[in-house]
Amino acid sequence: MGQPRTGYGPRTADHVPCLAESWRSLKVAAWLGWQIESNWTDPFLFAIYSVVKPVAGALILVFMYLVVARGGLANPLFPYIFVGNAFYIYVGAVLMGISWVVIDDREHYGMLKYLYTAPLNIYTYLVGRGAAQTAIATVATTITLLFGVGALGIRSHREGWTGGCLLGPSSSTGGARVPGAPPRRALLADGGNESLRAISTGIVILILAISTLVLAVASVLFFRWAERIAHRRGLLDMQTMH
């Protein structure tokens, strides 16, 4: 489990966390993230909130589309917008999830400096906190899509589904459309964008696997670099009253 550290700063060879410590940090962080996101409320009430919120957001989108675009729900453009909006929930979870955890723990709760004195792996702690938000985003996305299929009849406009799958997840990668290829193949078979259709499924999966591995390694290296800078500048316990 490791001994509590008397100071905080970048990990050295003496502080390399073992696998058990990393797994424990991940589980505790995921549980803590879930509790914070649910505001420590009753699970039943949070379950109701988790259903009502995405449905309300979907209804807002529907009325905005009807008023602004003055188009009916049968318009082929609507499924594209609706599904893209549903998957865009992931963009907020990815871009704001882990990064906001650092600000929240440092500025709001003032606990970041204490986390660095605890026997845990900070990196896996942040991943666990982000995993909780990703799980909530997954539930919201699923409910939104089910509402669209069940209440709005979004099931036959296959191009809309494909465009939405591309629009949502790829928005966090600068518009790169390759990550949307597997959903495109599953939903559209041989149709869709010509450039995507020319790429085999195996190549797409290989690209996804390599890019995921590269980004994972890059994230660890960048985190360690930023951690050393923050320690050297005394930013771990600094509060900007943000």
Image (cartoon, grey):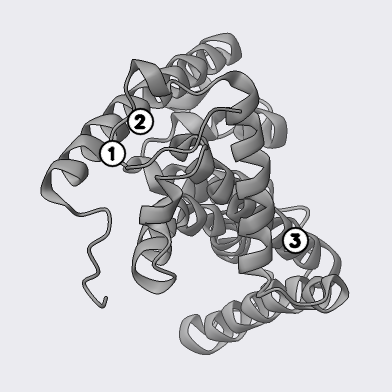
Quadrant of the rendered image containing residue 215? top left
Q: Which residue is mark 1?
A: 9
Q: Which residue is mark 2?
A: 219
> Residue 102's x, y, as percent?
38, 56
Residue closer to the observer: 104 or 65 = 104
Which residue occupies 28% across, 38% down?
Answer: 9
Which residue occupies 29% across, 33% down?
Answer: 10
**Residue at far bottom of view:** 67
Quadrant of the rendered image containing residue 16? top left
> Residue 18's x, y, as percent?
56, 19
Left or right: residue 189 compared with residue 125: right
Q: Quadrant of the N terminus?
A: top right
Residue closer to the observer: 1 or 154 = 1
Dot 1: element: loop
Residue 68 higher or lower than 157, as above or below = below
Which residue occupies 37% across, 41% down?
Answer: 6
Residue closer to the observer: 209 or 79 = 209
Query: Label 3 vs label 2: CA separation?
Result: 37 Å
| Amino acid type of the residue that numbered disc 1 sits on in the rendered structure | Gly
Q: Earlier in the sequence, mark 1 or mark 2?
A: 1
CB atoms at circles 1 and 2 under 8 Å apart?
no
> Residue 121's x, y, as percent?
49, 34
| Amino acid type of the residue that numbered disc 3 sits on in the rendered structure | Ile
Residue 75 seen anywhere in this rendered image of the structure: no
Dot 2: element: helix
Q: Which residue is mark 3?
A: 154
| Amino acid type of the residue that numbered disc 2 sits on in the rendered structure | Ser
